[in-house]
Image (tube, rainbow, N blue to C red):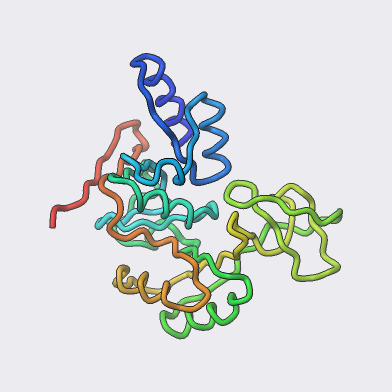
Amino acid sequence: MIELLASQATERVKQENLTIVCIPTSFQARQLILQNGLTLSDLDRHPELDVAIDGADEVDSDLNLIKGGGGCLTQEKIVAGYAKCFIVIADYRKKSKSLGEQWKKGIPIEVIPMAYVPVTRALTKNFGGAVELRMAVSKAQGRLLPVRSCDSPWLYSLDKDLTVLTNGFDSQGPVVTDNGNFILDWKFDKVHEWSEVNTAIKMIPGVVETGLFINMAEVVYFGMEDGSVSVRKKEPR
C-alpha cells in the first residue's frame, strides 16, 4: 500500500509540479522517498505536518488502530501526532469491528531493555492476557553484528555464545528498535476500554510507547478484495 502511495505521489509531483516534503517513519519509508526522488526531511526542519499517511495492522469501528507489527510504533506515532490530519491506508484484512478480531499477534509495546521483565509482569497482572518478548526468527552462526529494526531489525543476544548474521530475518535474539529498545507483544484476552488502557500502560515505568493509536486517525481507506475502496471516517463528537 505505502509503496503504491509513494509511486502515485511521485507521478502527481511530476505532472502537477507540486512541492512536497516527506518525513519517514522507518528505514523502508526513507528508502521509498529517496528512490522516488521525493524531498526528504525531518521534524527538526518541519515540526508541524499537513498530513501523515500510514498503514495499520488493524482498525476497529471507532478508528482505534493497532500498529507496530514492523517495529516502528514510536516513530509512527510521533509523526502522526504532529500532523494536522492522519490518514490510514489498509487492505480489507485489517478491517474489524473490535481490535483483536483480525490481528492475533497482540499489541506491540516498546520498552527500555532493562525493564522488559517487570513491565511484562505488570501487564499481565493489571490487564490479563499473555506477553511475549519479540524475537528474531531463527538461530544462526557467524559474527555478531547489529542490524537495524523497523524493516530489518537490530538484534541483541542475551547469550554470549549465541551469534547472529547481519540478515535480520535469519537470526535469533530480541528485536531491538531504532531507538535501542525491546518490543513486547501483549496478546490481550478481552476487549478493553482502549483509551484508558493505553494511558495506564504508558504510565508503567519502562514503557516507551504503545502500538495503540487512539483517536488519531481521521479517515481510513480499505482496499477491498474486489478492487473497490471502503471508507471509514471518524464520527463527529
Q: Is residue 94 left or right of residue 138?
A: left
Q: Quadrant of residue 213?
A: bottom left
Tell me if residue 110 comes above or below residue 167 in the rendering: below
- Report the front residue among 123 and 227: 123
Q: How many marks?
A: 0
Tell me if residue 38 comes above or below residue 161 in the rendering: above
- Report the front residue among 41 and 6: 41
Residue closest to the far top:
15
Residue closest to the far left:
237
| Residue that appears at 34% across and 33% down | 226
The x and y percentages for residue 235 are 17, 53
Tell me if residue 155 comes above or below residue 169 in the rendering: below
Q: Which quadrant holds the N terminus?
A: top left
The x and y percentages for residue 23 are 45, 40
| Residue that appears at 33% across and 71% down | 191
| Residue that appears at 30% across and 54% down | 216
Q: Is residue 167 left or right of residue 160?
A: left
| Residue that appears at 62% across and 71% down | 113
Q: Which quadrant holds the C terminus?
A: bottom left
- Report the front residue among 85 and 134: 85
The x and y percentages for residue 230 are 27, 39
